Image (spheres, rainbow, N blue to C red):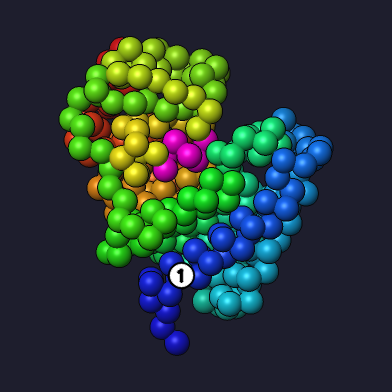
């Protein structure tokens, strides 16, 4: 049976909503995180949400591969048929540090990559009640209404958002960060996935992430593309596999890339 992108989008949206509701049962409680070897926090809510998402995908699409932050890669498929053509990426709680401190800017992220291209993406912010979803050719939708990037054409009139300002120095992006920050009209932090959502919905013009994993990125290439924007690496390549990411508008991308590389 052929599954349409619309079917995948509906499935991913419902799945993100279910996992998000699960996380709310733990939100703003006396939750004590553990710390993984990379010193990032993880909670029972992260694990339970990913388990829920994985179980639903495995039941509905048993031939698909799954990549998740907490439980790694499940490489399924039919014996002798090669690698699966469909790969789901899961971040059950993007922004766990926000989550454990009771800050509402955390998200459930789900992306579907088909033959190497992200075709479906969903970002759900349970504590804020914001759902952002997109599929190729079907538009980008924010709580049921079309989402579009900003129409501003000058970075000096725009809002630059980011997560941890200290991370730019750690990942050798300090000089670019200073140039971009000086050029922007205003700067705000503590964003994580929410920063990319702000760009897709026209509420910010640039989101900078000097380090990202595939599961952090997965929903956003198609979300930004369908909203009229750009998501990809700091060199201008649309990808989820570069270990870094920016979101911006198509109009501002040349300015942003110039400032990044103007050494």
Q: Is residue 145 left or right of residue 59?
A: left
The answer to whether residue 18 is above or below residue 170 is below
Q: Quadrant of residue 101?
A: top right
- Looking at the figure, which quarter contains the C terminus? top left
Magenta-span inclusion, residue 132: no
Q: Is residue 157 left or right of residue 45?
A: left
Tally of numbered tags: 1
Residues in magenta?
192-197
Q: Quadrant of residue 38?
A: top right
Magenta-span inclusion, residue 196: yes
Give the camera-side residue of 172 and 90: 90
The answer to whether residue 125 is above or below residue 234 is below
From the top left corner, tell me how far across and down residue 123 is, in percent: 49, 52
Q: Quadrant of residue 77?
A: bottom right
Identity of the residue drawn at 73% across and 53% down: 25
Residue beneath disc 1: 10
Q: Is residue 207 left or right of residue 129?
A: left
Give the camera-side residue of 203 and 234: 203
Q: Is residue 54 visible?
A: yes
From the top left corner, tell me how far across and down residue 159 is, in percent: 34, 26
From the top left corner, tell me how far across and down residue 155 is, in percent: 25, 24
The answer to whether residue 248 is above or below residue 183 is below
Q: Is residue 176 visible?
A: no
Our reading of the magenta stretch's main secondary structure is helix
Identity of the residue drawn at 55% across and 38% down: 105
Secondary structure under tag 1 reads helix
């Amino acid at each position: 049976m052929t599954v349409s992108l619309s079917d995948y989008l509906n499935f991913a949206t419902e799945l993100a909503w279910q996992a998000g509701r699960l996380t709310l049962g733990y939100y703003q409680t006396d939750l004590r995180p553990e710390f993984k070897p990379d010193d990032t926090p993880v909670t029972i809510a992260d694990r339970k949400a990913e388990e829920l998402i994985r179980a639903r995908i495995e039941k509905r699409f048993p031939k698909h591969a799954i990549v998740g932050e907490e439980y790694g890669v499940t490489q399924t498929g039919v014996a002798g048929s090669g690698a699966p053509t469909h790969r789901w990426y899961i971040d059950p709680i993007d922004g766990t540090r926000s989550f454990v401190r009771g800050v509402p800017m955390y998200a459930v992220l789900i992306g579907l990559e088909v033959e190497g291209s992200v075709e479906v993406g969903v970002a759900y912010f349970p504590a804020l009640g914001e759902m952002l979803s997109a599929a190729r050719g079907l538009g980008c939708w924010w709580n049921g209404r079309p989402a579009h990037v900003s129409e501003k054409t000058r970075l000096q009139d725009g809002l630059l958002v980011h997560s941890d300002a200290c991370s730019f120095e750690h990942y050798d992006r300090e000089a670019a960060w200073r140039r971009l920050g000086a050029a922007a009209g205003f700067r705000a932090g503590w964003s994580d996935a929410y920063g990319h959502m702000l760009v897709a919905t026209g509420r910010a013009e640039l989101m900078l992430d000097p380090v990202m994993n595939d599961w952090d990125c997965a929903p956003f290439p198609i979300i930004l593309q369908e909203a009229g924007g750009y998501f990809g690496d700091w060199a201008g390549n649309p990808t989820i596999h570069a270990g870094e990411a920016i979101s911006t508008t198509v109009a501002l991308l040349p300015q942003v890339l110039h400032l990044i590389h103007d050494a």
